[in-house]
Image (spheres, grey):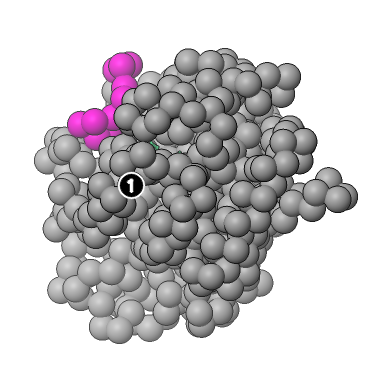
Amino acid sequence: MKIVICASEVVPFAKTGGLADVCGALPPALEKLGHEVVIITPRYKTSNIKAPTPIVHIGENVRVCFVEHNHYFGREGIYGEGGGEYQDNLERFTHFCHESFRILKEIKFSPDILHCHDWHTALIPVLLKTNYHNDPFFKNARSVLTIHNLAYQGVFPKNQYGKLGIDGNVFHTQGLEFYDQVNMLKGGIIYADAITTVSPQYAKEIQTYELGCALDGVLRNRSQDIYGILNGLDYDVWNPVDDPFLDFSYGPAVVNENKQQNKLVVQAALDLPLKENIPMFGFVGRLCIQKGLDIIMEAVDGIVAKDGQVVFTGVGDKKYHRMIEDAAQRHPRHVGKFLVFDERIAHKIYAASDFFLMPSLYEPCGLGQMIALRYGAIPIVHKTGGLADTIRLYDPIHKTGNGFVFTEYTREAFIEAVEESLKVYKQKAYMEDLREQALRYRFSWEKSAKEYMRVYQECLS
Ligand code: ADP
């Protein structure tokens, strides 16, 4: 099958979150199943590319085509700068979508599947059924839209509709119109041949009023064509056995000792007291309401009171930057922070932490908890979306489960889960057992890629 992956961020070129990890890992997994895959992505000023453009080959046989446009993509940020979004994001990503069709013709790649991701590429399913409806080059093509996070929809004032370059008027309730505005994601949901999201649980949740972000009705209308496919993790990139960013690498045999060594490294870097046997709670993620920071910040004093250390890595909303800085000032011996986006630091935090805080308000899939398991950091999660699909409550008696899970999104329930984790931490044998179990978990891309193939086949049949 000929498959095109169109996305605004792809590892190793550009990344702000899990979308990039997925779009970097799925193409080689599809290629290994014997399919021809082309990636199309913008070339940003910050993109990590050494080869010539517009077309370079990476890895196996996956081809990558970059859309170049100095005015649109030659900037410091991907979606914005200094906490704000670029004002012309509609134009930027509209250009990207139109260019994707042009590039495919240029490289003579007549696709079976155009697989788009999030609102930035949601115009592609619309264009396929309008501008390219009668184009023989795209005669066999079907489109799949993956929603990585329903909260980001690409909503713009209606006077921008004309800039989309769509043949015919689809600014109506069965098209891109949404409360008298343009909604890019809605267009994709209506026009794509299939819709996927990144976990089975989130596929159900987005069709409910509570988590449907005002598109639940539109999604329910397409419920026959919605699939939940859990993301895999790239176990080569995330591998504590030979992780170049770690000072002390480890596999199951030395996880307990070397985690402590990595902990000392992080404590030293943050000027925290050097103590191997203090429980360390790590956070790595975007600093936004989604990631449960409100209840984390309410629990910090309690964790500190029990002599736990909390270490934050992230960038995002100013409000949370301030709250974390306050907590670090209040508890200089227990709270540390790296308020940056830095791959190296993230690896070190996963490796050093005993527990990983991910009490997300909602979570489409979440990679943080999978990475944490890989590094023997035990996730503490809210039972929602992909977290509910991947983390099960640890039962020390039957030795089942891989983390700590709470159901109600409240400070009390979260604190209770943290307290449970501290109880297990005190029982060395249980803690070591739990850690060894964590290291054995696998969320394989091969399995996910096969599920995507089934969706593609369904679209083509
Ligand atoms: P989301 O896609 O909602 O941001 P995920 O858990 O799916 O959340 O993926 C987050 C990814 O981004 C993980 O690979 C995580 O390690 C990485 N990440 C998040 N914040 C940072 C940071 N400040 N520095 C380095 N990596 C980060």
Q: Whole-percent x and y of residue 41?
A: 36, 38
Res 177 seen here? yes
Quarter of the image with the C terminus is bottom right
Quarter of the image with the N terminus is top right
Q: Whole-percent x and y of residue 399?
A: 83, 46
Residue 44 lies in magenta, yes or no?
yes
**At 57% from the left edge and 26% from the top edge, which residue is drawn?**
259
**The quadrant where residue 299 appears:** bottom left
In the depicted structure, whether residue 374 falls above or below residue 378: above
**The quadrant where residue 31 appears:** top right
- The secondary structure making up most of the magenta span is loop
Q: Whole-percent x and y of residue 432?
A: 72, 34
Left or right: 329, with 75 as reference point: right
Write down the region rendered in magenta. Answer: 42-52
Res 129 seen here? no
User: In the image as oriented, which residue stretches furthest toward the right?
Assistant: 398
Q: Which residue is mark 1?
A: 331
